[in-house]
Every structure is written in structure tokens, then in C-alpha cells.
Amino acid sequence: MGKLEPAAERLSAALNALEAGLVPLARAREEAKAAQARIAALEAEREGLLARIAELEEESESLGQISEEVETRLDGAIADIRSALGR
């Protein structure tokens, strides 16, 4: 029995060390799951923002075209008024 007691003590110490190592591992796994969920949420938000940026770019282009048309018409109207006043 002399050899059995030290072996049992070593086994007990090894099990205690294993159990102590499992706690941080479990915590790290939970943190990793939370981080993955946060990453997924951020990626979804990013996609939404990219879509909104694309919409705003299209709207900006459309407003630019309208502005150019208004400018052209105003220039024409001003030229017509000047012409009429100059007669």
C-alpha cells in the first residue's frame, strides 16, 4: 500500500489542477460566444449602413442632376429677361 498512497495523491492533485483549469476555459468559451454574437450584430449593422450609404449616394446624384436642370433653366430665364429688358 505504500506505493498506492502517493499515486492516489498525485492523481488527486492532477484532478484538482484539471478542475482548476476548466473554470477559465469555460469562462473563455462563454466570452467567445458573446464576442461572436456581438460580431454578428456589428456585421448586420454594417450591412445596413452600407445599404443606407448606397441609397444616399443615389439620392445625392439625383439631386445633383435636378440642381443642374434648375440651374440651366434659371440661366435661360435670366437670359430671356435680360434680352427682353435690352430691347
Image (tube, rainbow, N blue to C red):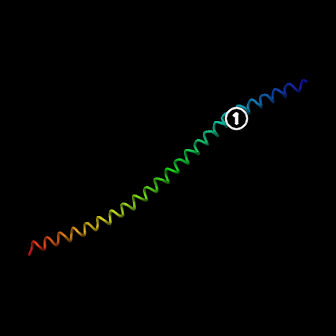
Q: Which amino acid, by three-letter code, is at mark 1?
A: Leu
Task: Please indicate whether residue 86 sits to the left or right of residue 73 in the image.
Answer: left
Task: Please indicate whether residue 45 sits to the left or right of residue 9 in the image.
Answer: left
SS at badge 1: helix
Task: Please indicate whether residue 9 sits to the left or right of residue 69 in the image.
Answer: right
At a point 57% along the width and 45% down the height, the residue shown is 37
- Residue 10 screen position, x and y as percent: 81, 29
Q: Which residue is mark 1?
A: 22
At a point 57% along the width and 43% down the height, the residue shown is 35
Q: Nearer the viewer, residue 63 or 26?
A: 63
The image quadrant that residue 5 belongs to is top right
Q: Quadrant of the N terminus?
A: top right
The image quadrant that residue 15 belongs to is top right
- Residue 61 screen position, x and y as percent: 36, 63
Q: Quadrant of the C terminus?
A: bottom left
At a point 17% along the width and 69% down the height, the residue shown is 78
* On screen, residue 44 above or below 15: below
At a point 39% along the width and 60% down the height, the residue shown is 57
Task: Please indicate whether residue 10 sits to the left or right of residue 62 in the image.
Answer: right
